[in-house]
């Protein structure tokens, strides 16, 4: 099994739309006409959820003219948020066909199909001409990608000079161990964490200038612990719908990594030279 196939197998669990619909009904929401807020607990699949999506939006420049690329778009929650709140046009790409199909259907149900669209594609072989996009971002994706130079060089190729690229990734901290499973890897064989210094160097080598960096380890730990303490069981809609039987262990291992300092969710804003 190739690395790409292993990543798809980790995320693609089948019946995803049915599980989301059931969760929405259990939460008292209309699964035929959900809002972006109804979907946020499950489709903003990254540390700090909507809170982090708001930070992403703030790091993107105002007045973007042209399409924005979401690399590793998952279920498309951040793309729909940017379309609804900023009026942006977003194209998301993801390796997992199930995610892409559900992302397009959820966008249709939210009335955003004309502003956001999703395609199955490999982040290491972006099928777009040079300088196609006005901005790009990626959230909690590069942990599953071993070839970071190819990833960032490919994104640089499809961005216009001067375009903003925002990275929000789970980075390797200076202390402690990472235990698996985690939300992004069952046993560590599909996990390729790097530290902030390495990320900065990879971006610079790919043709970006790093403008600002924002480690969010403490904020992420507080966000997760608040939700853990507030509920005896997962909410009707949440990332447990995506992770299956490994959810509880993966969640506890991620919390342990945040507490130990071995995992640090971090925002980096860079500009294409």
Image (cartoon, helix red, strand yellow):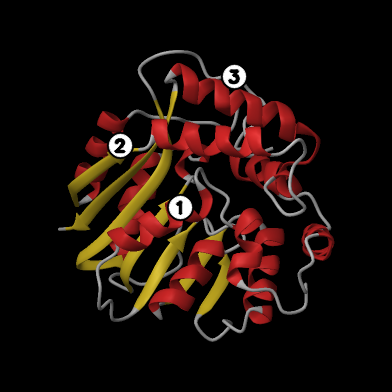
Q: Does residue 265 appear left or right of residue 102 in this picture?
A: left
Identify the residue at horizontal 31%, vertical 61% (top origin). 58
Answer whether residue 124 is visible to the viewer in this image: no
Residue 23, placed above or below residue 246: below
Residue 254, by quadrant, is top right
Q: Secondary structure at mark 1?
A: helix
**Figure quadrant of residue 38:** bottom right
Q: Are marks 1 and 2 in contact (CB under 8 Å)?
A: no
Q: Does residue 138 appear in the picture of this structure?
A: yes
Residue 216's x, y, as percent? 37, 37
> Is residue 79 found left or right of 107 in the rendered image?
left
Say which residue label 1 marks: 51
Q: x and y percent of residue 65 in the render?
A: 28, 81
Contact between labelled residues 3 and 2, with CB atoms less than 8 Å apart: no
Figure quadrant of the C terminus: bottom left
Mark 2 or mark 3, whichever is nearer to me: 3
Between the residue at mark 3 and the residue at mark 1, the CA separation in whole angstroms equals 26 Å
Per the rendering, the mark at residue 179 is 3
- In the picture, measured across the screen, residue 75 lies left or right of residue 245, that is left
Count of numbered badges drawn on the protein: 3
Q: Residue at x 65, y 38 (%)?
A: 230
Image position of 112 with respect to 163: above or below: below
**Distance between the Cα atoms at labels 2 and 3?**
22 Å
Q: Which residue is mark 2?
A: 199
Q: Residue 193 vs residue 154: left or right?
A: right
Residue, x 63% and y 42% (percent of image)? Answer: 7
Disc number for residue 29: none
Q: Residue, x 41% and y 37% (percent of image)?
A: 219
Q: Please, which residue is most extreme toward the front here?
A: 230
């Amino acid at each position: 099994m190739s690395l790409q196939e292993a990543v798809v197998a980790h995320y693609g669990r089948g019946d995803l739309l049915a599980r989301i619909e059931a969760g929405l009904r259990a939460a008292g929401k209309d699964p035929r006409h959900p809002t972006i807020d109804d979907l946020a607990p499950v489709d903003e699949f990254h540390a700090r959820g909507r809170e982090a999506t708001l930070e992403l939006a703030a790091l993107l420049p105002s007045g973007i003219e042209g399409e924005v690329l979401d690399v590793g778009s998952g279920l498309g929650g951040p793309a729909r948020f940017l379309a609804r709140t900023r009026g942006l046009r977003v194209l998301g790409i993801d390796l997992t066909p199930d995610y892409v199909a559900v992302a397009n259907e959820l966008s249709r149900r939210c009335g955003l199909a004309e502003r956001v669209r999703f395609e199955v594609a490999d982040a290491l072989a972006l099928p777009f001409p040079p300088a196609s996009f006005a901005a790009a971002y990626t959230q909690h994706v590069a942990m599953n990608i071993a070839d970071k130079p190819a990833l960032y060089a490919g994104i640089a190729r499809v961005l216009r000079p001067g375009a903003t690229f925002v990275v929000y990734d789970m980075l390797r901290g200076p202390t402690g161990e990472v235990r698996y499973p985690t939300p992004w890897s069952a046993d560590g064989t599909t996990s390729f964490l790097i530290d902030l210094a390495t990320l900065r160097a990879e971006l610079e080598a790919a043709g970006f200038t790093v403008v600002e960096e924002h480690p969010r380890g403490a904020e992420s730990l507080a966000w997760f612990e608040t939700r853990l303490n507030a509920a005896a069981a997962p909410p009707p809609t949440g990332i447990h719908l995506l992770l299956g039987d490994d959810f509880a262990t993966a969640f506890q291992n991620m919390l342990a990594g945040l507490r130990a300092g071995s995992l640090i969710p971090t925002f980096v804003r860079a500009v294409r030279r």
